[in-house]
Image: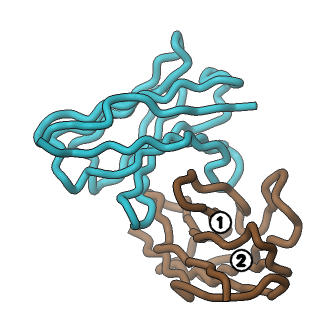
Chain colours: A brown, B cyan
Amino acid sequence: DIQMTQSPSSVSASVGDRVTITCRASQGIGNYLAWYQQKPGKAPKLLIYAASSLQGGVPSRFSGSGSGTTFTLTISSLQPEDFATYYCQQSATFPITFGQGTRLGIK
Amino acid sequence: QVQLQESGPGLVKPSQTLSLTCPVSGGSLRSGSYFWNWIRQPAGKGLEWIGRIFISGNTNYNPSLKSRVTISVDTSKNQFSLKLSSVTAADTAVYYCAREAVDADGGFDYWGQGMLVTVSS
């Protein structure tokens, strides 16, 4: 299985801050990488697919980059509604696997 | 607007079979443009992909669960289903159904609200 490792596991930030989350794959996955936002008691919400494509309806302050084994999710200016847990996910090979999550909290 | 919603028993006894269905509204399973997935999340933990099905009936399963999992599709009811046999307490989780576009290079774009299934006697 491909292991997806996110860093940091948790981060505290303030409204207006720029935040970057990194996801590393244990082997190359091309651009088969998606990012999700999950709030307590809710299903994950797709933010980014194909490593850098913004899902429809997602604010442009979210962006993704990377290919191969290292990927990043950047939130350019944090808004109050962005405090949540973020997951990366690869679909290059089976089984599809997720990162362990990054909890983004309020400083 | 596509909607998915998990349904089934919220409590299953150990060694029995967990059965969930996911009716799809606002879109047809017959479209052939999507995979239909099951994903689960134990309380306070991360996400685990269980498996998926295509309209042709072709399935892919997580090897860690493959011996116990069956995913099927019923086009007459526009829904797909999950069966997980010989359950234990470790199978207690919120179970999600989700759609994945065939040509989108990854990403589950629509999810059900999730259903908590508890395995307990």
Q: Identify the element where label 1 is drawn.
A: strand
Residue type at mark 1 is Trp
- Please give the count of numbered marks on the rendered protein: 2
- Give the quadrant of the C terminus of chain A: bottom right
| Badge 1: residue crowd in 10 Å (few <14, some 14–19, many ≥20) | many
Residue type at mark 2 is Leu
Q: CA distance from mark 2 to mark 1?
A: 7 Å
* Label 2: chain letter: A
Q: Which residue is mark 2?
A: A73
Image position of A43 with respect to B74: above or below: below
The image quadrant of residue A58 is: bottom right
| Badge 2: residue crowd in 10 Å (few <14, some 14–19, many ≥20) | many
- In the rendered structure, find residue A35 and report the number of the disc placed on it: 1
Taking depth in this image into account, of A43 and A56 the one nearest to the observer is A43
Q: Residue B96 location in percent, x, y?
A: 47, 44
Q: Identify the element where label 2 is drawn.
A: strand
Image position of A104 with respect to B100: above or below: below
The residue shown at (64%, 88%) is A12
Spot the residue most to the top: B76
Taking depth in this image into account, of B117 and A30 the one nearest to the observer is B117
- B83 relative position to B34: left or right: left
- Give the quadrant of the N terminus of chain A: bottom left
Q: Residue B90 location in percent, x, y?
A: 22, 56
Q: Residue A38 location in percent, x, y?
A: 60, 61
The residue shown at (47%, 27%) is B80
* Label 1: chain letter: A
The residue shown at (51%, 84%) is A9
Disc 2 + disc 1, Cβ < 8 Å? yes
- B37 relative position to B32: left or right: left
Let me know if marks 2 and 1 both belong to one chain. yes
The residue shown at (68%, 56%) is A46
